[in-house]
Image (spheres, rainbow, N blue to C red):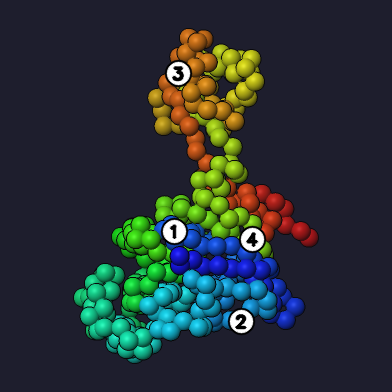
Amino acid sequence: MTSIDVQELTKEYGTTRAVDRLTFRVEPGRVTGFLGPNGAGKSTTMRLVLGLDRPTSGTATVGGQPYATLEEPLRHVGALLDAQAAHGSRTARDHLRALAASNRLPGTRVDEVLAETGLAPVARRRVKTYSLGMRQRLGIAAALLGDPPVVLLDEPSNGLDPEGIIWIRELLRRLAREGRTVLVSSHLMHETASFADHLVVLGRGRLLADMAMREFVQARVDPRVRVRTTDGAALRDLLARHGYEAARHEGEGEGETPGGGGGERWIVRHARVEDIGRLASGAGLPLLELAAEEGTLEQAYLDLTATEAEFAAQSPAQPQEA
């Protein structure tokens, strides 16, 4: 099994501990989202996995081996850490040909990844003429060049247009379906939620969470039910008698609901749709809307990392200190 294994990994730069005794495993067959605030240690960890930095203590291995001991590493691990890494005076095709030659990969593979990443029409243009999104595609092409079982990508959606974002999302899912080990660092919560199966979350160099994405969200965001009715007072009283607390949707006037449609909208926390529906039906209470409000990855992530950000802007609502 080709997994990424991090054991008691620590990296110190002088008096700063960038990575603090990390232990986790990235399994094949799923996309693992690698999350954390700026300065959390994500990029440092990826560099340690790839042998670009030496750990102060602990280990990071790929398929049970340190990356530095792998022969023809592009056949084992594909990585994108910096979209600006390609030499600007080379064409995209020449950049990939050089990588292929150094890892004894067939030249036909270059044309395959150029086509796969959508760069075939501009393959003979110099990299310095590329936009950031095109450079990202070139970095991904380089990562896929050796058809590796392990793929690490740092912010792969950065600079991509909407079509490119959809493309990278589908690519990551396909790689996981093929049984590869996929680790993706990102700051885009909505995008991560669209492709990740599992999450590893860091804060100030420490491991904060290592679990399935759905479990992560459910564990940190209360389940809620959205109800719209023409008799808000009756709804509130009914729910109170059964131990539920209903809160009026903020910003509504009497008898109004966002988007029109009449009625009042209420939010019931720690509740399930079937339970609220059963109570309303039994009481003969008219309902215009009854829906579950699922928590989002962004909500769960911010709840977990609220005290872990190294840099945080002050809320406009808070007064500035004198």
Q: Amino acid at mark 1?
A: Val
The C terminus lies in quadrant: bottom right
Name the quadrant containing residue 138.
Answer: bottom left
SS label for mark 1: strand
Q: Mark 3 vs mark 4: give the one in front.
A: 4
Report which residue position mark 1 lands on. Answer: 31
Q: Amino acid at mark 3?
A: Leu
The N terminus lies in quadrant: bottom left
Q: CA distance from mark 1 to mark 2?
A: 26 Å
Q: Is residue 233 left or right of residue 160?
A: right
x and y percentages locating residue 116 in the rendered image: 26, 69
Report which residue position mark 3 lands on. Answer: 287
Name the quadrant containing residue 80.
Answer: bottom left
Q: Which mark is residue 207?
A: 4
Identified at 52% across, 41% down, the residue is: 295
Task: Decide which of tag 1 and tag 4 comes sooner along the chain.
Answer: 1
Q: Does the image show residue 181? A: yes
Vertical arrangement, residue 57 with respect to residue 278, above or below: below
Identified at 45% across, 67% down, the residue is: 2
Q: CA distance from mark 3 to mark 4?
A: 44 Å
Q: Does the image show residue 169? A: no
Task: Decide which of tag 3 and tag 2 comes sooner along the chain.
Answer: 2
Q: CA distance from mark 1 to mark 3?
A: 40 Å
